[in-house]
Image: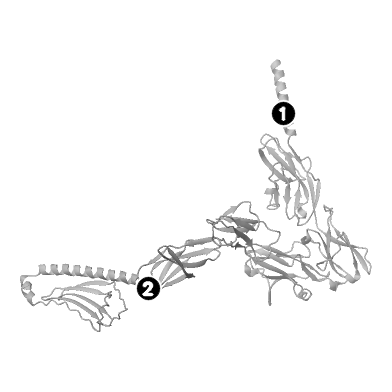
């Protein structure tokens, strides 16, 4: 008996604890109803409390009139990409963008932890989406009353803006406006802060005064690679047939209609009297004036109106030089700039060596220690993939040479951004002498020393390796190497000749040996038209032929023919050696000819 009573007490205790835990979990919606304009963004405030920091699931849903499991808005195709929920602790505020009439309904939030069922608010929030409409009343021959009306009461006591033929009417900010017959034209209205969501226009007093084309803005600045929407508003008298709007681009003096077959161009109209041009993947060549016109026969009514000037820009990092560029311990100021003013006061993102620099969200950045600065680039938040070209200090320069006559030209190259300045220096012992500026340096005959270039921009500087000259004639370095190759080839030829001669003598009979006395051995060198200057010794040859022939007579020739005279200053290098053998007669010769 006591056991059963204890069990009942235990069960009751558990139920009380569960009820207490359940009471600690709730959802609070601060609004019961909201009114929003078509095309605007709506925020539904929401808070929730939970007995556990581990939430199993949470979601917003639209209350269905019929029975069935609610669907998470973030997974509903109707709301895909248009809704987001705050991720802050105990905050469940819903943001819904670009609302339309079909979004009108009742919305609620729910969540669950691992040990509970779904918990939601007792009742949801009713959202009503409305458009603006101009209505006329008390119309007389000389005056009429216009009202900017909506199907629900807009929040925050809004300020209204009235337009006549697309142009704002100043000092008219109320719900009503009175129009005199002398002010005939087309009238529309909007709510301040939502000027692009203006109402359809109505024609008041005089149809000929109701033709107009206007735009929300007269100029737009956009990033290269981004997309832009240009909204045009038009009015016309009630008549048939309805005018057909079309978009044109004007690059002075030409005006051409935009093609619907271009994948980057889209034209659509989601609201009355509104036509939108959407341009994608912008390039600099898209910078132009864009105009909304009526096609014939009504073009005459709109051809004189101005259009929207579109400027397409890239981002660029500007470097403000310190007092002494390249000096350590000085600060370099970077600024992210564009050729036009980007809208909506953008937030900038900085990158160092491709990685984001945290807590740097303005268009300026200070680099305090740039001895190892790396590379810096910038982007606009929301367009991170459209970042600017990077700026960086000079890379280690490379030096190449070009020989021309008795001089050598050294060429220095380094990769850097911004563009660097080049300087050449000569080092002799401990002395360093500035020779000049520029990427090239020409070293003439008689110059010796060690040479190097210095590359410098606002970020820093970098030195090349040294280039040494020890000869009075810079070209002599290359001639000396040619002499070495020529002597080496000659030595190989002599060794091969001696080896072939030994083999030929040992293989012949005594008869051949007896006739050896009559075998002429000639070392004949003929120099035709060869100058007598004994200083012209640097002659190298590229064609040396050795031929072995086995006959009764062995003639050894070393014949050198110089058909054309060599001047004292001329240097010839040769690097071709040919060996051949024949069976008829034994001639071992070395023929070197220059023509």
- With 113 as the anchor, is 352 left or right in this view? left
Question: Would you say 578 lies left or right of 331 here?
Answer: left
Q: Quadrant of residue 218?
A: bottom right
Closer mark to the observer between disc 1 and disc 2: 2
Mark 2 or mark 1, which is nearer the start of the sequence?
1
In-front residue for pair 167/171: 171
Q: Quadrant of the N terminus?
A: top right
The local secondary structure at tag 1 comes to helix
Q: Residue at x 35, y 73 (%)?
A: 473
Is disc 1 in contact with disc 2, using a CB cutoff of under 8 Å? Answer: no
Image quarter where the C terminus lies is bottom left
Q: CA distance from mark 1 to mark 2?
A: 102 Å
Residue 435, position as x, y percentages in the image: 46, 70
Task: Name the residue tied to disc 2.
Answer: 446
Image position, residue 377 (x, y; %): 59, 59
Indicate the position of residue 516 as horizontal and vertical percent values.
8, 74
Picture coordinates of residue 467 (x, y %)?
A: 40, 65
301 above or below 62? below
Mark 2 lies on a secondary structure that is loop
541 to the left or right of 330 = left
| Residue 566 in sight from this viewpoint | yes
Image point 81% across, 63% down: which residue? 200
Neighbor class of circle 2 (other Cα within 10 Å; few <14, some 14-19, many 20+) is few
Quadrant of the rendered image containing residue 376: bottom right
Can you name the residue that lies furthest to the top here?
1
Q: Residues within 10 Å of mark 1 (few under 14, many from 20)?
A: few
Q: Nearer the viewer, residue 580 or 561?
A: 561
Residue underneath mark 1:
17
> On screen, 147 above or below 80?
below
**Residue 63 shows in this picture:** no
Identify whether 12 is placed above or below 104: above
């Amino acid at each position: 008996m006591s056991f059963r009573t204890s069990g009942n007490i235990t069960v009751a205790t558990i139920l009380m604890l569960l009820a207490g835990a359940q009471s600690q979990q709730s959802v609070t919606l601060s609004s019961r109803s909201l009114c929003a304009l078509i095309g605007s963004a709506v925020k539904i405030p929401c808070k929730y409390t939970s007995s556990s920091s581990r939430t199993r699931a949470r979601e917003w849903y639209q209350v269905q009139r019929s029975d069935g499991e609610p669907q998470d808005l973030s997974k509903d195709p109707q709301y895909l990409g248009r809704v987001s929920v705050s991720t802050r602790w105990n905050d469940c505020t819903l943001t819904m963008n670009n609302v339309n009439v079909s979004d009108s309904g009742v919305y609620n939030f729910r969540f669950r932890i691992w040990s509970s069922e779904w918990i939601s608010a007792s009742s949801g929030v009713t959202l009503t989406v409305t458009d603006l409409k101009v209505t006329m009343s008390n119309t007389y021959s000389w005056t009429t009353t216009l009202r900017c009306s909506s199907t629900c009461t807009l929040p925050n006591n809004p300020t209204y803006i009235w337009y006549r033929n697309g142009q704002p009417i100043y000092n008219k900010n109320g719900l009503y406006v009175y129009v005199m017959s002398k002010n005939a034209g087309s009238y529309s209205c909007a709510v301040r802060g939502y000027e692009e969501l203006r109402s359809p226009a109505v024609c008041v007093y005089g149809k000929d005064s109701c033709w107009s084309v206007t735009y929300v803005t007269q100029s737009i600045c956009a990033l290269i690679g981004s997309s832009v929407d240009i909204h045009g508003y038009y009015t016309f008298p009630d008549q048939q047939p309805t005018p057909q709007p079309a978009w044109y681009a004007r690059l002075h003096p030409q005006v051409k209609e935009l093609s619907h077959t271009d994948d980057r161009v889209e034209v659509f109209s989601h609201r009355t009297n509104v036509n939108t041009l959407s341009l994608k993947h912008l390039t600099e060549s898209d910078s132009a004036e864009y105009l909304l016109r009526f096609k014939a026969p009504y073009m005459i009514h709109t051809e004189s109106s101005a259009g929207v000037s579109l400027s397409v820009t890239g981002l660029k990092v500007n470097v403000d030089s310190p007092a002494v560029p390249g000096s350590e311990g000085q600060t370099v100021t970077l600024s992210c700039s564009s050729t036009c003013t980007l809208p909506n006061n953008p937030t900038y993102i900085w990158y160092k060596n491709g990685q984001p620099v945290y807590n740097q969200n303005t268009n300026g950045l200070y680099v305090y220690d740039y001895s190892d600065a790396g590379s810096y680039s910038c982007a606009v938040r929301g367009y991170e993939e459209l970042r600017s070209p990077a700026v960086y200090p000079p890379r280690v320069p490379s030096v190449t040479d070009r020989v021309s006559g008795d001089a050598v030209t050294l060429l220095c190259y380094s990769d850097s951004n911004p563009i660097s300045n080049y300087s050449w220096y000569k080092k002799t012992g401990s002395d360093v002498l500035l020779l000049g500026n520029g990427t090239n340096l020409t070293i003439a005959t008689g110059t010796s020393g060690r040479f190097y270039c210095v590359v410098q921009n606002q970020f820093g500087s970098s030195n090349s390796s040294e280039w040494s000259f020890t000869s009075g004639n810079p070209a002599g370095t290359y001639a000396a190497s040619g002499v070495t190759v020529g002597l080496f080839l000659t030595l190989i030829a002599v060794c091969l000749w001696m080896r072939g001669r030994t083999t030929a003598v040992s293989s012949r009979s005594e008869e051949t040996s007896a006739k050896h006395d009559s075998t002429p051995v000639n070392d004949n060198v003929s120099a035709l038209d060869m100058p007598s200057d004994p200083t012209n010794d640097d002659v190298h040859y590229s064609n040396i032929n050795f031929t072995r022939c086995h006959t009764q007579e062995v003639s050894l020739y070393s014949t050198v023919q110089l058909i054309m005279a060599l001047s004292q200053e001329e240097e010839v290098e040769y690097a071709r050696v040919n060996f051949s053998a024949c069976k008829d007669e034994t001639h071992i010769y070395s023929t070197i000819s220059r023509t």
